Image: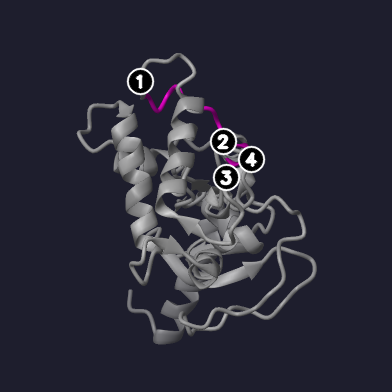
Amino acid sequence: MVFSRREFASALSAAAGLLPLLHPLAATAADDPDAPQNVFFSPCGQPFRAKADQPYPIVQWFKQADQNHDGRLDRAEFLADAEGFFNALDRNRDGVLDGTEVAYYERRIAPEIIGYRVLLSADGTRGGARLWLAQDVGPAPSSDEDNPPKVVADESKQGAAPFGLFFAPEPVAAADLDFSGTITKPNFLKLADLHFTQLDTAGQGFLTLAGLPKTEAQKAVEAYQRRHGVRS
């Protein structure tokens, strides 16, 4: 049987209409504005993101930080991971995160802090579009990464807290231990060291993935996946 172009296009359209029935999670994740964000913020504030049907991305962070891949994250690895992220944020390499660098972090690297939902592309990487979550909607972020928009904050006041192991709405700014308005590397690492001690509740000198607490986001994501019959 030979199909005309119009008949072939109609067949494709009909097949596409069946995809939500065959893959309900994919359709829901794309269309459901209430689907929880599959996002994890590391203790030092680095965001990790995954699609709705993927494992909670704390796994991504742990694999990154566990440099010798032995399934144990010791204090040295934990601090090295924090230092690596600090160096990535320190754009002028002066050993201090100033207001401009912190604003860049909040608006470009971790916009969940100020109330944005980061949209992921098909391969799971971050896309350019963002959906505003706060009710007091401000202008959408500009495409000029060196001039981040001056927009309002997340109305929930929780920022990154639901995605992290500690209640820290702004985990990078939390390292401003002397309230100077800037974050020094020693203070950043001092907070990281404290975080390791707090997570190492058994005093073993190392952390395991299974032994880490679940974030509020992880609980929501796993409940969402159970409702949709997903095995991540």
In contact (CB < 8 Å): disc 3 and disc 4: no
Identify the mark nearer the N-term, 1 or 4. Answer: 4
Mark 2 and mark 1: Cα distance apart in space: 29 Å
**Which label number is shown at residue 163?**
3
Q: Which residue is mark 2?
A: 222
Q: Nearer the viewer, mark 3 or mark 2?
A: 3
Mark 3 and mark 2: Cα distance apart in space: 13 Å
Q: Nearer the viewer, mark 1 or mark 4?
A: 1
**Which label number is shown at residue 205?**
1
Dot 3 alpha-carbon crowd within 10 angstroms: few under 14, some 14 to 19, many 20 or more: many
Identify the mark nearer the N-term, 1 or 3. Answer: 3
- Relative to 50, residue 1 above or below: below
Residue 148, quarter of the rendered image: bottom right
Dot 4 alpha-carbon crowd within 10 angstroms: few under 14, some 14 to 19, many 20 or more: some
Please state the extent of the stretch shown in magenta in the rendering: 207-217
Can I make out residue 124 in this image? yes
The image shows residue 43 at horizontal and vertical percentages of 48, 42
For the N terminus, the quadrant is bottom left
Mark 2 and mark 4: Cα distance apart in space: 20 Å
Report if residue 2 lies within the magenta region. no
In contact (CB < 8 Å): disc 1 and disc 3: no
Residue ID at (40%, 52%)? 185
Q: Nearer the viewer, mark 2 or mark 4?
A: 4
Q: Which residue is mark 4?
A: 167
Dot 1 alpha-carbon crowd within 10 angstroms: few under 14, some 14 to 19, many 20 or more: some
Q: Nearer the viewer, mark 2 or mark 1?
A: 1
Q: Nearer the viewer, mark 1 or mark 3?
A: 1
